[in-house]
Image: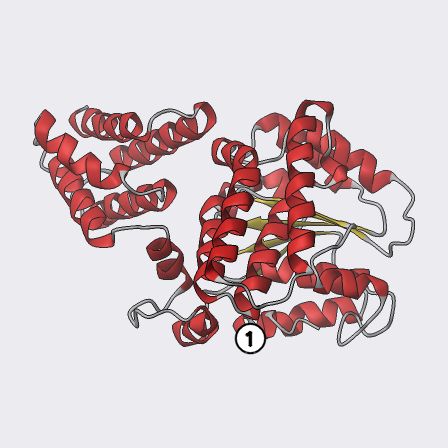
């Protein structure tokens, strides 16, 4: 049980093991901690243990349910995620095309199938029928791919990668726009699904990531389900920012804190990817570098922006265009803005900026980023507006 989680979160593994073995695992749980701390891994391993038909709780079990989980073909698990799947999928495809070994193949299959759990029939609505059709096509392609041997030639791998990207296009496009894949209609579908009589299933599990980013209507609808979940229905919420989750939801969940994973362990887990750059020793660095993120250029641009704001010295149009070019060339906008706000917070701690100004900047930057994703606005315009809003706040 928890063979993967025990490597990254050994203490938490024992806590989760105990609660499942004693049948005291809560129907509503919150897994909170920083990015890349194995929250999703934990949620899936917990779901496997809860779904096991034997007393082994998934530990070396070959029951029908455990076999399905081993291949990420489970039918009793829904995952509603807002993570950057475009980057994760792109990295998994790059790794497979480059290495073409069993690890890269399995990692690609796992990444795609977790992504497709957001298109479970438990959240189907007539409004997203076309997306579900696209998800089915991707699923069929991956199923065929999983049955092929490992001796791929480079051209064969490239052709498969091209076809996969093409079929994923409509799904990735929607994923990029949505703050969370959960809608009010989706919650209603979930409520119907979890209320149905279990057939050939021991449990039904719903994993929801970043619930704090959903709107009030979604949160209120979800509350109704969390209040009195069925005996064999489990909700696992994942969050990087639990402080932003409304109190009424927090009061209904059991909280589990995930610590950052030790860098040495991260480096060991990255070994199968055959990374040539020895400086890439964390998951964050790996995914950022693989996506084309230019850390030095971005860092320099952010420092210029922050310095301009703190000293109230307006950048010229040419200077701003130069700075934004480095930011706009990356597809890691959320990470970049997080870095920007971290620098602003540090300026507050250094007494270089007032508390009220700091709070307003954080609020405005979050709003502008959310609008950019919802309405698919040009990133260049977003960064320009972020800078202008920061200047307005510091000069207010």
Residues 25 and 82: in front is 82
Image quadrant of residue 15? bottom right
Against 62, residue 78 (above or below) is above
Q: Examine the rendering and report whether any part of residue 342 can be seen.
A: yes
At which x and y percent is residue 24? 78, 63
Front one among 342 and 43:
43
Q: Is residue 18 left or right of residue 258?
A: right
Residue 114 in percent (x, y) is at: 62, 51
Please, is residue 109 above or below residue 217 in the view? below
User: 244 above or below 313?
Assistant: below
At a point 74% along the width and 67% down the height, the residue shown is 19
Judging by the rendered image, the residue that carries numbered circle 1 is 7
Figure quadrant of the N terminus: bottom right
Disc 1 crowd, CA 10 A, few/some/many (<14, 14-19, 20+) = some
Q: Position of residue 210 (x, y in %)?
A: 54, 43
Residue 341 in picture, x, y percent from top left: 29, 43
Q: Which residue is drawn at 24% across and 49% down?
A: 346
In the rendered image, the quadrant that contains the C terminus is top left
Q: Residue 108 or 312: which is nearer the viewer? A: 108
Q: Say which quarter of the image contains residue 189.
A: top right
Residue at (76, 38) in percent of width and height: 121
């Amino acid at each position: 049980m928890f063979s993967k989680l025990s490597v990254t979160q050994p203490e938490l593994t024992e806590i989760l093991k105990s609660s499942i073995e004693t049948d005291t695992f809560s129907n509503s749980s919150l897994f909170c901690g920083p990015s890349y701390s194995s929250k999703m891994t934990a949620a899936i391993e917990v779901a496997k243990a809860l779904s096991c038909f034997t007393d082994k709780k998934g530990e070396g079990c070959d029951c029908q349910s455990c076999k399905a989980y081993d291949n990420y073909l489970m039918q009793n698990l829904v995952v509603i995620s807002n993570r950057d799947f475009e980057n994760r999928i792109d990295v998994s495809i790059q790794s497979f095309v480059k290495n073409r070994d069993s690890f890269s193949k399995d990692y690609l299959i796992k990444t795609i199938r977790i992504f497709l759990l957001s298109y479970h029939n438990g959240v189907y609505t007539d409004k997203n029928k076309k997306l579900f059709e696209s998800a089915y096509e991707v699923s069929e392609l991956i199923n065929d791919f999983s049955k092929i041997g490992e001796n791929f030639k480079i051209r064969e791998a490239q052709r498969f990668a091209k076809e996969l990207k093409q079929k994923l296009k409509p799904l990735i496009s929607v994923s990029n726009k949505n703050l969370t894949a959960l809608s009010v209609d989706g919650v209603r579908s979930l409520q119907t699904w979890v209320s149905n009589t279990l057939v050939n299933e021991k449990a039904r599990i719903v994993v929801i990531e970043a619930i704090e980013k959903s709107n009030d209507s979604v949160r209120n609808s979800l509350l109704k389900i969390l209040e009195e979940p069925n005996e064999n229905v489990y909700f696992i919420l994942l969050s990087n920012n639990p402080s932003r989750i409304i109190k009424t939801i927090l009061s209904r969940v059991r909280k589990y804190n995930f610590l950052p994973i030790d860098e040495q362990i991260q480096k060991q887990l990255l070994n199968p990817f055959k990374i040539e750059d020895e400086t890439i020793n964390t998951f964050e660095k790996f995914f950022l570098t693989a996506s084309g993120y230019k850390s030095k250029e971005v860092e320099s641009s952010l420092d210029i922006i922050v310095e301009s704001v703190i000293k109230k010295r307006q950048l010229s149009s040419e200077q701003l265009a130069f700075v934004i070019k480095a930011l706009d060339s990356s597809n890691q906008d959320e990470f970049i803005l997080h870095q920007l706000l971290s620098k602003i917070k540090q300026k507050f701690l250094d007494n270089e900026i007032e508390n009220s100004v700091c709070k307003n900047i954080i609020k405005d930057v979050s709003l502008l980023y959310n609008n950019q994703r919802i309405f698919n606005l040009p990133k260049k315009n977003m960064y320009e507006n972020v800078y202008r809003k920061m200047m307005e706040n510091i000069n207010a």
